[in-house]
Image (cartoon, rainbow, N blue to C red):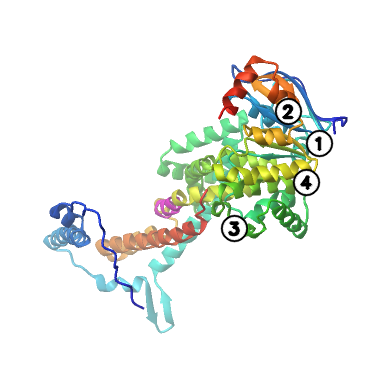
């Protein structure tokens, strides 16, 4: 298949060209060179610093923490196991956070004074406590009182912390749906619940997806904090490996790369979903 | 028709938005099968008047009765009542995430609990009636303004409403699409539907209206049959308004 040569010659005056220097700085080649230069500089600085302090790089020992072949055959390594635990923890916490966030948002939008007050109170309370302190509260205070272990303390803590952020996403998404949609739903006899379920929420999904992706990524990253109460997950396992091997540089670089890989994959995945839900109004 | 019983009755109805007096002591009634056209300058309360009829807005005092049911905010009957009263909006307000067919069937299926196959049959019948049966599987955004408004009319008809309210149905349309919507409305009028229409389309009003209502500053200034209304309006305000919109 060949593309036909354009045969049309414009009759009008050619527009003035951009400055050659501006054009060059704007080009892809220039960007790549600049990027490589900056990243290379940072890597070189770190490497020469490590050499200067006589650091003994042992990258060859890293792959066994992902997987290994022993007499028993293929085995997942500790980092892989930790990654699965991090993902499980974050998924459960995220599911809870979405459910709680929706409830908080609906209470806030209900228009009933008591419900709005409860929701705003909860929002301000959680939003103004640092995540680490909230975690200690759940583990040392609420855990013993209500009888849940460190695993559930960390899940509930993450869920509560993120439910507040998610409720704001829901609220913005719901408010972004045109008022006329409410009126149309109302005028065909729908109750408030039916209007939310069939008309408003399906439309607000496309407003909520981009910030929601951000929240998923945020959740995976903030799940690292539960390592301070020694819940088994990626960061905790990184610490454990280092305490046995003293390879802190290699392990922390690796752990950071694993988090980055996960969050990048999530972002790309969601951008596909976003296209599916794109609707014109 | 003239002897039919009133189906909508306003009895000394007042409506405020904060300090703004939107409807002032409105008393008027619409008989079953009557076609009433409401006109007046913008901000005169005509939209508020018809939005009160299906409880999109609630009046503050007086009695408003629709189809034997009193309309007020906490009424248990308000959802049932809204099923009886269809509404067509200036901005169409179709559901953009649903296809045309789904727009028409979601009300009957979810609200009236009609079976999906029956809802679809009804929907196709009314799409035929508004002359766009071939658009059933498209999304509203793929349709022209005139087509969207006809879908909106069909959506109300699918609820088997007995009363239809039109809130400036042609004001957001390009001029060449106004007639296709008005034609559908004229046909609807011929079926004996009770209609309350807020519009500035005076040609349409002359053709279908049984009663013309002129509102200004929240009051009903004049109520008259079209032959009197257009030739010999009683009030000076109404005459001035008609001069302005009919002069060109």
In this view, the residue in front, A227 or B4, is B4
Q: Earlier in the sequence, mark 2 or mark 1?
A: 1
- The percent coordinates of residue A69 (x first, y second) are 38, 81
Extreme-left residue of the structure: A52
Q: Determine the main secondary structure of the stretch shown in magenta.
A: helix
Residue A118 in view (yes/no): yes
Q: Which picture quadrant has residue A144?
A: top right
Are the residues at dot 3 and dot 2 in contact (C-beta closer than 8 Å)?
Answer: no
In this view, the residue in front, A46 or A60, is A46
Residue displayed at 87% across by 32% down: B4
What chain letter is assigned to the residue under label 1? Answer: B
A61 relative to B155 in the view: left or right: left
State how far apart marks 4 and 1 are (Cα): 15 Å
State how far apart marks 3 and 1 are (Cα): 33 Å
* Numbered disc 2: secondary structure: helix
Q: Earlier in the sequence, mark 4 or mark 1?
A: 1
* Numbered disc 1: secondary structure: loop
* Numbered disc 3: secondary structure: loop
The label on residue B160 is 4
């Amino acid at each position: 298949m060949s593309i036909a040569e354009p045969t049309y010659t414009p009759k009008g005056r050619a527009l003035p060209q951009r400055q050659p220097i501006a054009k060059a700085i704007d080009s892809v080649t220039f960007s790549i060179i600049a990027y490589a230069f900056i990243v290379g500089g940072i890597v070189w600085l770190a490497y020469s610093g490590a050499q200067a302090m006589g650091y003994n790089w042992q990258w060859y020992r890293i792959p066994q923490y992902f997987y290994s072949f022993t007499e028993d055959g293929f085995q997942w390594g500790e980092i892989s196991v930790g990654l699965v635990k991090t993902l499980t923890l974050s998924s459960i916490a995220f599911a809870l956070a979405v459910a709680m966030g929706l409830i908080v948002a609906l209470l806030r939008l209900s228009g009933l004074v008591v419900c709005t007050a409860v929701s705003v109170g909860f929002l301000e309370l959680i939003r103004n406590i640092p995540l680490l302190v909230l975690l200690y509260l759940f583990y040392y205070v609420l855990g013993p009182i209500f009888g849940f272990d460190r695993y559930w303390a960390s899940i509930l803590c993450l869920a509560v912390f993120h439910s507040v952020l998610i409720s704001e996403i829901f609220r913005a998404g719901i408010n972004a749906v045109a008022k006329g949609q409410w009126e149309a739903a109302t005028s065909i006899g729908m109750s408030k619940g039916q209007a939310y379920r069939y008309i408003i929420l399906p439309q607000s999904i496309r407003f909520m997806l981009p910030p929601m992706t951000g929240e998923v990524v945020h959740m995976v990253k903030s799940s690292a904090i539960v390592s301070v109460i020694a819940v088994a997950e990626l960061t905790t396992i990184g610490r454990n490996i280092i305490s046995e091997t003293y390879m802190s540089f290699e392990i922390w670089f690796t752990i950071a790369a694993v988090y980055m890989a996960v969050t990048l994959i999530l972002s790309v995945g969601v951008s596909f979903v976003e296209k599916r839900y794109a609707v014109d109004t | 028709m003239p002897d039919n019983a009133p189906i909508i009755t306003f009895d000394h109805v007042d409506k405020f938005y904060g300090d703004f007096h939107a409807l002032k002591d409105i008393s008027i009634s619409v008989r079953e099968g009557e076609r009433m056209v409401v006109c007046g300058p913008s901000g005169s309360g005509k939209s508020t008047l018809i939005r009160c009829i299906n409880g999109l807005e609630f009046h503050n005092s007086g009695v408003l009765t629709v189809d034997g049911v009193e309309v007020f905010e906490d009424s248990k009957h308000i959802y049932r009542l809204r099923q009886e009263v269809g509404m067509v909006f200036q901005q169409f307000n179709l559901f953009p995430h649903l296809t045309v067919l789904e727009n028409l069937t979601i009300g009957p299926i979810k609200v009236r609990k009609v079976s999906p196959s029956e809802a679809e049959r009804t929907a196709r019948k009314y799409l035929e009636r508004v002359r766009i049966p071939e658009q059933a599987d498209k999304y509203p955004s793929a349709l022209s303004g005139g087509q969207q408004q006809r879908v909106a009319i069909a959506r109300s008809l699918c609820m088997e409403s007995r009363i239809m309210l039109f809130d400036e149905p042609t004001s957001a349309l390009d001029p060449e699409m106004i007639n296709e919507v008005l034609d559908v409305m004229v046909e609807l009028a011929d079926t004996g539907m009770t209609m309350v229409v807020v519009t500035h389309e005076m040609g349409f009003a002359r053709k279908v209206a049984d009663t013309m209502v002129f509102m200004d500053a929240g009051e009903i200034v004049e109520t008259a049959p079209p032959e009197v209304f257009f030739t010999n309006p009683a009030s000076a305000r109404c005459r001035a308004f008609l001069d302005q919109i009919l002069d060109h």
